[in-house]
Image (cartoon, rainbow, N blue to C red):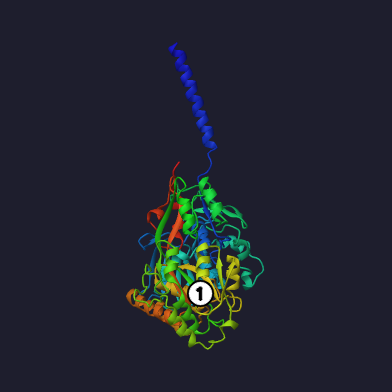
Amino acid sequence: MLNRKVKILAISLCLMGILVSLTGLCVAPSIVRYSSDWPPSIDPAVGSEVESVTAQVNLFDPLIFPDTEGNFLPHVAKSWDVSSDGLVYTFYLRPGIKFHNGSELIAEDVKFSMDRLLTIGEGVAYLWLGNIKETEVIDKYTVAFNMEKPFGPFISTLPSFFIVNKGLIMENIKPGIYGEMGDYGKEYVSTNDVGSGPYMIKDFSRAEYLLMEKNPNYFLDISTAPDEFQMIGSTEPVLIKTLMAKQELEMTNRWLSPETLESLAKIEGVEVARWRSSSEDYITMNIRKPPLDDIHVRRALAWAFDYDTAVKLVPGSVQARGPVPMKVPGSDPNCFQFHRNLERAKLELKQSKYYGHFDEYPMECQWNDSPLQEKDAMLLMANADEIGLTVNVVETTWSLICSDSASIETTPHFHVVGDEARYPEAGALLQARYHSVTAGTWEQTEWLLDPVFDKMIDDAFATVDKDERFAKYREASRYIVDLCPSIFLLETPECRAYQAAYMDWPAAKGEVIQGFKYDNCIRFIKLNP
């Protein structure tokens, strides 16, 4: 009898083992799904906004990697040297790093990536245009950047430089405007994988989603990272709430209203993470379009705006003090700050050359996709009406914002926009928002085109001593406030809902990597069963 029971137990355990084995074969991959503005550009030489860089930090590798303390760590480059005159930066690459197609990442790829970026001149090329004279291959694993002049923040900028696969791009070049380089692979790279990063493209529907899977040959240990990462092309609150409730979405975007976040926080297992970032919200003013070409009109709007109400709309925010958030090194804590004063606003208008004719100059304010942006636009409209100015509010799309920003004529009077320091120095935002090299992009719809300011920033960048460079940033911030090309709205916290019950996300715990959208590096996330 006992032997019969033992046999039955043994058979049962064997069947259970087989079942477990079979079940293991069918286990669904662990996945992080993220609601995204759409569409992103996965090409590092083209895309530069939040969603594009979110894709890029997972698909590609930089030479060096930022940490949570603002330090820069070896990554593709195992070490580097800087010449005593600050004109040559030499990087020594790790051998054996593989692109997703299996070819090795070498110095030729680094040179090609920088040459391609600077030639195309889009995306974040402005960080290095006019600074890098030549990228030189020393040997298979050594590459040097020879500078036109000293560029103090160079190391700080490099987490925004992603390395692409030269060989694969050269095999897929089509006719284009770049001479013998044709289209420099822009069409191919827009939908195909040319990276070496921790994730690789599994499926890409440009109208709906980008699905990535973990790189099995990554040079670092990512064994505990999620198997897949999917960016879903929707920021629609009702859909997001439905997906979060069904555990079919792990992370939300940063543009949800406080009301939506509050509703999401009521879902079992969902929490809202908040942290102070280097982000600021602005209302940009096209200073080349009447009546905003008159500084008195711009100042009148800055005095009329109701900052206190705007702050109340975003819990955890504070009114901005000038063009750079106080969290960013090199910002100016003593920068002049406008406040609501309708009498001051009306006095400014009386000094305008358009005074008495404002009815002939209706203005347009565009916003995109965010209910908070819509509220700021509506607030501007109401405040402008109080001082006799007409502002019409128009919803648009991200694609139209990018295309309309290409010329002064198609850029509207106002945009409501958020921006973030691309590296931890005030110069990052000052350049991106106001230097002439970024005019005609979504980051600068003011069309400042001010040679004095350009010279100030160029001089700051050429200053190797950090304290001296930061002092020059503060002077440049004050200069911008005097010109009043923007309404400096809010320093905004990052607010995102996520599945806290089964997702260990370092950024949500305050362990935020100090690089633009590196908080969305999926390889650092762990999913609990």
In-front residue for pair 256/42: 256
Q: Is residue 95 left or right of residue 28?
A: left
Q: Quadrant of the N terminus?
A: top left
Which residue is label 1 attached to? 284
Amino acid beneath label 1: Thr
Residue 163 shows up from this direction: no
Q: Is residue 240 left or right of residue 470?
A: right
What is the x, y in percent for residue 158? 44, 66
Identify the residue at image location x=61%, y=69%.
Answer: 181
What is the x, y in percent for residue 233? 57, 56
Residue 441 shows up from this direction: yes
In the image, is residue 303 above or below residue 224? below
Q: How many marks?
A: 1
What is the x, y in percent for residue 19? 52, 30
Identify the residue at image location x=43%, y=71%.
Answer: 307
Q: Quadrant of the C terminus?
A: top left
Identify the residue at image location x=58%, y=54%.
Answer: 209
**Farthest residue toward the left?**
467
**Farthest residue toward the top?**
1
Quadrant of the rendered structure where residue 182 is? bottom right
What is the x, y in percent for residue 302? 46, 77
- Local packing at callout 1 (Cα closer than 10 Å; few below 14, some 14-19, many 20+) is many
In the image, is residue 179 above or below residue 369? below
Callout 1 secondary element = strand
Quadrant of the rendered structure where residue 491 is? bottom left
In the image, is residue 407 above or below residue 160? below
In the image, is residue 492 above or below residue 482? above
